[in-house]
Image: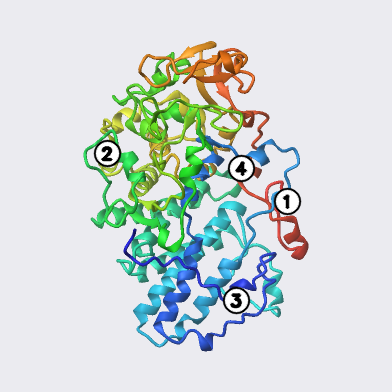
Amino acid sequence: MKAIKIIFGIITFSLFIACNDEYLDRLPQTQLSPRNFFNNPQDLKTYSNGFYSMLPGAEIATDDAQSDNCLAVQASELTRILTAANASSENVTSGWDWADLRKINFFLENYQRVDTKADYKNHYAGVARFFRAMFYYNKIKRFGIVPWYSGTMGTGDIDLLYKTQDSRELVVDSVMADLDFAIQHIKEKADEYGTIDKWCALFLKSRIALHEGTFRRYHPELNLEGTASHFLEESRKASLEIMNSGNFSIYSTGNFANDYYNFFAADDYFDNKEVILSSVYDEKFERGSSLNYILYNYDFSMTKDLVNTYLMTDGTRFTDNVRYPTRKFVDDFLNRDPRLFQTVMGPGLTRNGEKYVPIVTPGGNPTGYVQRKFYIDNLEGTYYGDIPIYRYGEVLSNYAEATAELGLLTQTDIDISINLLRDRVGMPHMKLNYILTNFDPILEAQYPNVIGEMKGAILEIRRERRVELAGEGRRYDDLMRWYSGKLLEAEFLGMYFPRTGRYDMTGDDIADLILVEKMPPTVDQEEGMVYLSLENVKLTEGFKGNLISKESENKKFIEPKYYYRPVPRQQTILNPNLKQLFGWN
């Protein structure tokens, strides 16, 4: 049980309850009077506690299911778009909600009424602007352009109510201004565990500036390539400030085989110097997560493409072996980057005291590679462990990528970033001279728009980022900002089977699974053996090949259209001045 009081109880004012999310401007006048609320310092803290519901939680682990890292039992919005012939603003309708923004702007309009020290007020103003920056950039990622509102509105604000979207440049510059204010004014040390401090604001700037810089560099439809370097430099500077602070480090006990997994399996992160911000779960406050239950029931299935991305333990490429496409399950894990075994359930592990054998069904685990990261064995019921949502490992990855994109990367830069991540798992160091001249042909094919002197470094940093952050919900955003949506058209493959027959899946040379054409009668089945029938699953070559999911079929990623989402049709009826981008209607 955590001893520190958690601040995530959300205050439900009549202002918030009364909000109608159909359109930002269809909101009633507030019933919460500033005169009777913003009167003492505690009011600032109480009100700002309501912002924390905007932070992600355990769902970060589910976001990879929108990428080429992972499949989920339930089809994602992206899958429905890629496989639909009629995706439009009439059936892609989520995301156009603005109640959180009104909460933030209402606070910013009234916080100065409190009679207290300026630095105290500015701290909470910084927290509010942190959340506004996060809110608005999430909108930018989804819609490309949105209207910017710095204050609340009444029914008489006709010009504002019916304005069109503002430019991407204006909104993103406003986001960056909010973050700079937050960095300047939020306290360096949070008052309570799980709350925002200066380092959280720097982290968010590192992430957002990297996203915006690379998005502008690789998206020709925006015609903003000339402004990309500014944001990349901002990301690099924010990352470096965190790195130079001395406050953070990569969690490591020297146990290469378990430290990476153990980091994500911790109950809390009070004293963990890798965590910049965690999402707090606590039984006392009845805030729990079903993530462990979801992972236990095979709802997330990692792809063969992700598995192939991990290097060998000597630092060479797994895919350099000509036989890599036909490696069987147990062989996939031999002499690989230890993060693979700590991210994906592999041979020799147990679940609830029994040896783990992959179970593949039409409704679960279509690839055979089950996510292990975040999974806690022998845990029953709701999970109350905290989730690290901002961590130092991502900062190091951001720094390396931004520096490479700027053309400034040196071996020293790699040593203070990527190689610290590798040190945790005992992997050989990345060497700049080698990666600049020895391109991975698979990465070259995946990212054909990466060019220039730093091409090799950018490709390998992208590999490292994918490996280090797998299962943390970053991959989809990465593919979108790199203009790499076409990778989502590929078949999502799973384990390889050279023929029907018996297979050792646990690494003890004893068969545990039988691949059959048809399921034998129950009386003929061997006790303790897992059966996999071709009546229920599909292989790429009929009676042999890789498992293939039905979600791999008939996918089409339309560029640049699918890098964005449409404004829901109902909103364009309410406000005809709203524009659709890049072919959405």
The kind of residue on which mark 4 rests is Ser
Q: Residues within 10 Å of mark 3 (few under 14, many from 20)?
A: some
How far apart are the alpha carbons under marks 2 and 4? 33 Å
Q: Earlier in the sequence, mark 3 or mark 2?
A: 3
- Residue matched to label 3: 15
Viewer-proximal residue among 506 and 538: 506
User: Residue 424, which numbered label?
Assistant: 2
Q: Is residue 252 left or right of residue 194?
A: left
Q: Position of residue 109 (x, y in %)?
A: 52, 79
Q: Amino acid at mark 2?
A: Arg
Q: Residue at x 61, y 57 (%)?
A: 145
- The label nearer to you, 4 versus 1, is 4
Residue 488 is situated, as x and y percent measured from the top left of the image, at 58, 34
Mark 2, other Cα within 10 Å: few <14 / some 14–19 / many ≥20: many
Q: Secondary structure at mark 3?
A: helix
**Between disc 4 and disc 1, whose residue precedes?**
4
Report how far apart the C-alphas of labels 3 and 4 lie in the structure.
Answer: 32 Å
Of circles 3 and 2, the one toward us is 3
Badge 4 is on which residue?
76
In this view, 452 is above or below 168: above
Is residue 138 shown above or below 417? Answer: below
Q: Residue furthest front?
A: 523
Label at residue 89: 1
How far apart marks 3 and 2 lie (CA) works out to: 48 Å
